[in-house]
Image: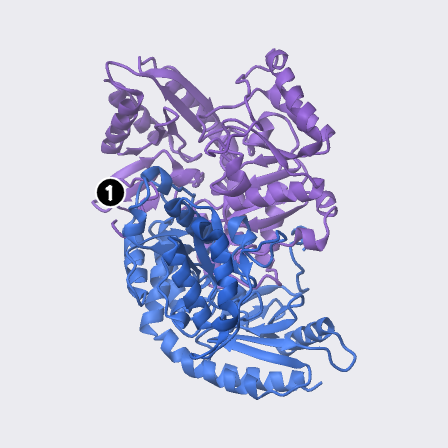
Chain colours: A blue, B purple
């Protein structure tokens, strides 16, 4: 491990096999992966259909020059566009979610000929660039990462409090906003879903002022938030959708999806973008395969019962170190509070280690003081039972 | 093709097979790929060993959570570090060359606690971010993309003219430079290699002033410029090396390579970086496989004779539309000039189409007025003969 830059801390365990919801270490011990890799394998690790389709593509063509397309790329585009609940008609495939967010934001900037980006204060939108500077992880102070109400009610009075804040922002900047960038559920930020009325009001304001809605579905897309896409939580129609992570189920492919009437506002020079692996046939084969599995195995529909089981169980927990439980679809966040002389950090790291010992990989964020569960959407019922038993055991402090 | 964003122009041909130096369209016509995809398949398309090793990895594990490493990742790191002619001892794997350049530049900025980046005026360093703003493709005016002399001589007087320019830049900014970012041969910019003495002088100045040398080997690395790495052309020792493209031979993986004594200057928070597919085992398996093929098939050594054959042939051409031929390793640029009432653009597009007709994919850049040949490093002698014959035929205008 000494030859790997310590860009984060690594457990003293090496992994060498993965299948379904499980991942194995080099000693043969297996772990239930409640992080789905990096929230990528919504279909489980090494889904047999996806692996089969990748091997097939490896026999044919994996890469080509920017001036040419491949049939599999066109097929993947068609399948993905059909997968949307509303009509989009054009897209490009890239490699990472951050890159696709950068593309989406720049697309909005060029169309509107404006520079400013509006986002919410707990959003995580990417590892670098404007996507990062619009995220809570940015050290840049931004008045344009605005606070928001949390609310699950269809009839709420959130707007009474928050409308003046939004109006104030728009009064100052409305002619400067290229886009509103929304992560439907702020997963890295703490599993927060903003109020639907609040989001709908911002979307109305941004579109009325000539800006675009760019939706970051890198984590919430492909069924993670209980719908095919997280924006369905708000019943809005984004102008630009960005996908990553689960689109490749472990393979590095992302996409930005939009409409040709927006594309047509740009000149070829403004649209010009080239990246080594943009539209690569191997990535396209993965996308097509993943979308096919979602359709054929009814992944989103079938996840609903599993989500409900986990939700019922987690919400029934009543431990003194649990401050709050938040969940949207197959995204569960357990906010921790100090207990029995232990700090939040001590509790989180203790649980992380105990779960690891018990054969479960959980997610955690010490700064944001919560632990997370984002298992594959097709987690088996027996695996849910195992998880529930171990949570009960570990939480018996 | 209507469902793909027109980020560049696509030929009305669909490709569906690739092997070695060849790529096939859906009508069964084959093309000699003198662009090596996007300058990525230095080992030829679908190299059997690389494809075999990818399939093997697909049976095991392709992706995992950031908190864990895999044995194949450690093996790939070890093999890649051993592949260098000088000692580096730490690295991380990312997805794209641009992302790795951004990482490398930010690494230099954090170590030096400085902001400015020095580059050369024809450099292409990436598709977005600081990597882009330091490139000739950026619309941002930059005094820090400096002019440079072209010269292949070991004893030249380039410094007499250019030393004052360098000294002037350093007089103004030396305490502000985080790094000098060098693309050893500016391939996208026109196949230009700067004077060795000039580069060595800048490197000395930047290091004396406390800045780092960050080398962009995304295109020139892995044997493309006639050496394992392009920086060997200048006999310099960079602080940070960035690899992409040929590191994955068609698969999206990149790397930044440096030394642990530099890493140790940063806090864990400063080093922190997380991306979905960073250090993924599938990418690592590809890197290990590619490095093994370079070693076992002596790709760099064996390319020398092929390079010489192509160079001798191209430099013997004496057509009135050829303004100049430039070549470094397996990178050939043919600068075009107006001829017989045709503009440069007309000539370039005419040749591109004629080569396509003849079954050869060439590279071209209309703005920079040149056509390019960057075939795989292991192009067969019979393929070189085919290419030579077709060039003679097409160039008979």
Is label 1 in a helix, a strand or a loop?
loop
Q: Residue at x 50, y 76 (%)?
A: A151
User: Closer to the camera, B197 or A230?
Assistant: A230
Q: Is residue B154 above or below residue B307?
A: above
User: Closer to the camera, A81 or A119?
Assistant: A119
Place of residue A323 in the rendered image (x, y in percent of width and height, measured from the top left)? 64, 80
Q: Say whether residue A111 is left or right of residue B54.
A: left
Looking at the figure, which quarter contains the C terminus of chain A? Answer: bottom right
Q: Is residue B174 above or below residue A106?
A: above
Task: Report the label total.
Answer: 1
Q: Is residue B340 above or below residue A105?
A: above
Quarter location, residue A391: bottom right
Q: Inspect this view and state whether residue B186 appears.
A: yes
Q: Say whether residue A153 is left or right of residue A280.
A: right
Residue matched to label 1: B13
Looking at the figure, which quarter contains the N terminus of chain A? Answer: bottom right
Quarter location, residue B229: top right
Place of residue B52 in the rendered image (x, y in percent of width and height, measured from the top left)? 44, 53
Q: Say whether residue A270 is left or right of residue B209.
A: left
Quarter location, residue A346: bottom right
The chain identifier of the residue carrying mark 1 reads: B
User: Closer to the camera, A98 or A294?
Assistant: A98
Residue at the limit of the structure toward the right, as seen here: A341
Q: Inspect this view and state whether residue B222 appears.
A: no
Place of residue A199 in the rendered image (x, y in percent of width and height, measured from the top left)? 44, 67
Place of residue B55 in the rendered image (x, y in percent of width and height, measured from the top left)? 44, 57
Q: Pointer 1: residues within 10 angstroms few (<14), some, or many (20+)?
A: some
């Amino acid at each position: 491990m000494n030859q790997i830059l310590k860009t984060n801390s690594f457990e003293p365990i090496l992994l060498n096999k993965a299948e379904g919801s499980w991942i194995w270490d080099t000693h043969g011990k297996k772990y239930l992966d409640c992080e789905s890799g990096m929230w990528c394998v919504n279909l489980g690790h090494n889904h047999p259909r996806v692996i089969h389709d990748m091997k097939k593509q490896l026999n044919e063509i994996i890469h080509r020059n920017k001036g040419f397309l491949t049939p599999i790329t066109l097929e993947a585009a068609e399948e993905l566009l059909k997968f949307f609940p509303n009509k989009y008609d054009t897209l490009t495939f890239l490699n990472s979610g951050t890159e696709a967010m950068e593309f989406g934001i720049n697309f909005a900037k060029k169309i509107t000929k404006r520079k400013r980006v509006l986002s919410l204060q707990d959003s995580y939108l990417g590892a670098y660039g404007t996507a990062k500077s619009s995220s809570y992880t940015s050290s840049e102070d931004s008045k344009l990462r605005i606070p928001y109400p949390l609310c699950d009610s269809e009839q709420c009075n959130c707007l009474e409090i928050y409308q003046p804040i939004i109006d104030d922002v728009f009064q100052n900047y409305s002619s400067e906003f290229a886009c509103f960038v929304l992560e439907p559920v702020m997963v890295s930020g703490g599993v927060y879903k903003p109020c639907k009325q609040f989001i709908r009001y911002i979307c109305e304001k941004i579109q009325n002022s000539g800006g675009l809605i760019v939706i970051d579905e890198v984590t919430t897309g492909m069924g993670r938030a209980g719908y095919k896409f997280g924006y369905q939580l708000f019943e809005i129609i984004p102008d630009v959708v960005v996908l990553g992570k689960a689109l490749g189920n472990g393979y590095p492919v992302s996409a930005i999806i939009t409409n040709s009437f927006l594309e047509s506002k740009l000149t070829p020079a403004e649209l010009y973008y080239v990246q080594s692996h943009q539209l690569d046939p191997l990535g396209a084969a993965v996308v097509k395969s993943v979308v096919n599995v979602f359709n054929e195995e009814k992944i989103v529909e079938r996840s609903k019962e599993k989500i409900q089981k986990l939700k019922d169980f987690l919400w029934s927990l009543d431990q003194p170190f649990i401050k709050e439980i938040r969940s949207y679809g197959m995204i569960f966040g357990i906010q921790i509070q100090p207990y029995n002389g232990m700090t939040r950090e001590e509790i989180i790291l203790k649980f992380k280690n105990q779960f690891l010992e018990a054969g479960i990989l959980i997610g955690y964020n010490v700064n944001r003081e919560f632990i997370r569960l984002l298992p594959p959407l097709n987690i088996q019922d027996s695996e849910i039972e195992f998880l529930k038993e171990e949570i009960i055991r570990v939480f018996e402090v």
